[in-house]
Amino acid sequence: MQTIDINAQNIAVIWLTLTPYSYSFKTPLETAHGRWSQREGIVITLLDATTGQRGRGEIAPLPWFGTETLDAALSYCTTWGTQLDLAVLPAVLAEIPDTFPACQFGLATAWLDLTQPTPPIALDIAQVAHLLPLTSEALTRLQDLQAQGATTFKCKIGVQDPEQEMAIWQTLSQQDQPQTQFRLDANGGLTPAIARQWLELAQVQGNVEFIEQPLAPAEFATMQALAQESDVMIALDESVTTFADLQRCYQQGWRGVYVLKPAIAGFPDRLIEFCQQHPIDLVCSSVFETAIGRQGALRVAQQLGSQRALGFGVNL
């Protein structure tokens, strides 16, 4: 990392503050990766010492998706010190290695918030997909959200016994709301045989928008085959965590849905440029970041312009 000399005269100084956070979900999230009950990350504040303007961003790693760890992110960022030269800061940000995608996003969005601030982005309830755990309370939750205008729901599968999950989901999917559609997210936790069962059931029910990451990223070829076998769409998620992952899957011919998580996909401008040059069927999704990271991710989503509901209906 470049050493920045801030002792010269007439240098505009940016103060860097790193604020680690940790909060517990009201309801732990059960996925094929395991039980997730606590979100940890780092809020970044850039303060222009001359103007007093602030920009904030968020580093929200997901190591089990392939990002850096929180400790690695904090260690990396602290090497910068607390004072940065405004003139060279953009070049320094550009040097963040691809092994730190959450840092790339967090620092880049903090810089954008400082230099190109925009009004907060608010979403209507119908613009997002709402997380709906497959539990005994799911039906009540579904009906409450439907009454408020929600139409897209996301259920985690590949967590419990497949027959139990399919039975609960069938009960939900039979509700008399023709505009309702479901996303079934396996987080790579299914076998090819169970994935085919879900695809068959989804085709019969007729209200599944897509099945998300049915198999592990290493089984890319099998997912391509499943996508060709079924009329139900398949989306990639863990397979396209980083920018390099996205490029590779596109080059290998994936033409299904891409679920992109801006907060862990690296530099926002690079992601936006790629998607503009290679029009793909995409969904922008949350990594359970705080409101600060959420605004940065929504800013990216707004520029990408997907017509699908955003994956930000999380309330844990």
Image: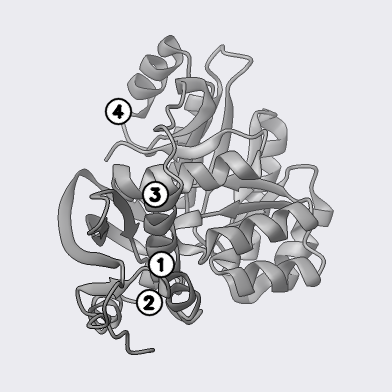
Q: Amino acid at mark 1?
A: Ala
First in sequence, mark 4 or 3: give its number. Answer: 3
Which residue is denoted by mark 2 in the rendering? 68
Element carrying mark 4: loop
Point out which mark residue 137 bears.
4
Q: Amino acid at mark 2?
A: Glu
Relative side of 127 to 248, left or right: left
The residue lying at 36 percent from left, 15 percent from top is: 144
Q: Amino acid at mark 3?
A: Asp
Which residue is denoted by mark 1 in the rendering? 102
Depth order, front residue of 172/256: 256
Q: Count neighbours of disc 3 (C-alpha within 10 A) and say few if under 14, some if 14 to 19, many if 20 or more.
A: many
Marks 2 and 1, how far apart in space? Answer: 7 Å
Name the front one of labels 2 and 3.
3
Circle count: 4
Depth order, front residue of 200/296: 296
Marks 4 and 3, how far apart in space? Answer: 39 Å
Residue 16 placed where, x, y %?
A: 23, 66
Q: Count neighbours of disc 4 (C-alpha within 10 A) and say few if under 14, some if 14 to 19, many if 20 or more.
A: few
